[in-house]
Image (spheres, helix red, strand yellow):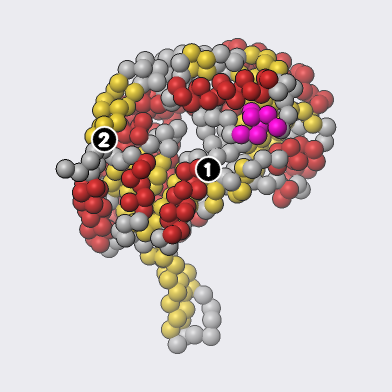
Amino acid sequence: MQSTSLIKSKNPYTKQTLKEYTTFTPKQINEKLQTANLAFESWRKTNFTQRKELLYNVATLLEERAEEYGRLISNEMGKPVSQAIAEVKKCASVCRYYADNAADFLKIKPIKTEAYKSYVQFEPQGAVLGIMPWNFPFWQVFRFSAPAIMAGNVAVLKHASNVFGSAVAIEQLYKDAGLPDGVFTSLLIPSKDVESVIINPIITGVILTGSEVAGSIVASQAGKNLKKSVLELGGSNALIVMDDCDLNSALDACIQGRFLNTGQSCIAGKRLLVQKGVAEEFTNKLLNRIQELKCGDPLDKETFIGVLAREDLAIKLEEQVEQSIKMGAELQTGGERDGAFYAPTILTNVNLDMPVCKEEVFGPVLPILTFESLEEAINISNATDFGLGVSVFTKDTAFIEKHISEFQEGCVFINDFVKSHPSLPFGGIKRSGYGRELSVDGIMEFVNKKTVYIK
């Protein structure tokens, strides 16, 4: 008998078991991949008009079921339900974006040479494996699967084990929208079985959003098997508040940028850098706003801070804060844990050697540092192993634009917090990974760029 395991989905707020899932056997995995491969042989021959119609169906269903899926997300990983519903609706936007633009992105590109005719045409590669995390259990999946499917590929999902309910729901959604069986497949497997999927010849490429450790392992496994990988890993984004900015607007953006999704985001602003001239005023305003944030039941639409996805994550966060305090950080508010709940926390008197600055902090904790000049702020911002994004708040946008190239980041946002958008390339440098998702860059990651030369 082939081995399986039982994985429980638990509500991190109520601590109740939602459902138990039996993981797939090697035989079931192989059958699923064979179905995906057969689906690819026919799906690749469909035209963009056919794909567009079906992806529009997906978008419509996402919007119609936003409340239902929002509750599912909240129950599985503790996200405040209003934010979970917004996540589902955002998925509809990325489906429509690629439905509308894929044909143009992938049209034949003429290139002038000495030949009678030469050009590049773009063709699907096959089955793309997406290894996705729990923090945005719908958005992460659709931002890889929508472009892959519109390009004529098929998508295979290995989701985080605590959101298997989302994985099952997304697969059913694609089927309900009319896509053939196998065009989107969810594999309910533990992490230990991922390598067997990566090495399977049916899989032609791998995209992962997750930790540095997971990224390193997956990149190694893909590389050994000569398969392309795209990695979106951790981040320690800086929020830089210049003394000439609109403080209230900057405050709003910093609250959203750090504490959305209870701070569980790779692109969250995890280090707040405030110019000394406004440091005291901004910190006081921030502390007042923190007290106003509603914490509690994720299913209450007024809740802004829910719980972390698992209690062990809250324990790790607690350890990072306590170690930083032992090293001299001063606790201004928060610092309390109750199960998977961790109170929104502000720390001052921090330095770059403390865990809250040196490590990725995945939760509602914000350390504050001060600086005198933009040069100093850039140096502090770059003093991390990560390079996903940075936000700068100022009225003198032209001045900041002159220094864009000095930020070691995948993106720079001025007067807003870092966020992903369907039409903008998304990804990082350094230990934040490589490759890009979204925009034209995202759909190009897993297509064959075929050169044609006719003499």
**Which residue does the image show at 31% across and 57% down from the upper left?**
200
Find residue 103 and report its horizontal and vertical position in percent: 40, 59
Find residue 180 and report its horizontal and vertical position in percent: 22, 50
Chain part drawn in magenta: 353-359
Find residue 131 and report its horizontal and vertical position in percent: 40, 44
Q: In which quarter of the image is residue 362?
A: top right
**Which residue does the image show at 32% across and 27% down from the upper left?**
9
Q: Check the image and report above or below for 375 versus 317.
A: below
Q: Is residue 154 visible?
A: yes
Which residue, as the protein is rendered here, is positioned at the far bottom?
455
Q: Which mark is on residue 5?
A: 2
Q: Are marks 2 and 1 in contact (CB under 8 Å)?
A: no
Whether residue 300 sits left or right of residue 385 in the image: it is left
Give the distance between the C-alpha atoms of the residues marked 2 and 1, in whole angstroms: 26 Å
Kindly identify which residue carries mark 1.
212
**Which residue does the image show at 63% across and 36% down from the upper left?**
237
Q: Check the image and report above or below for 96 versus 5.
A: below
Whether residue 369 sits left or right of residue 387 in the image: it is right
Three-letter code for the amino acid on which mark 2 is drawn? Ser
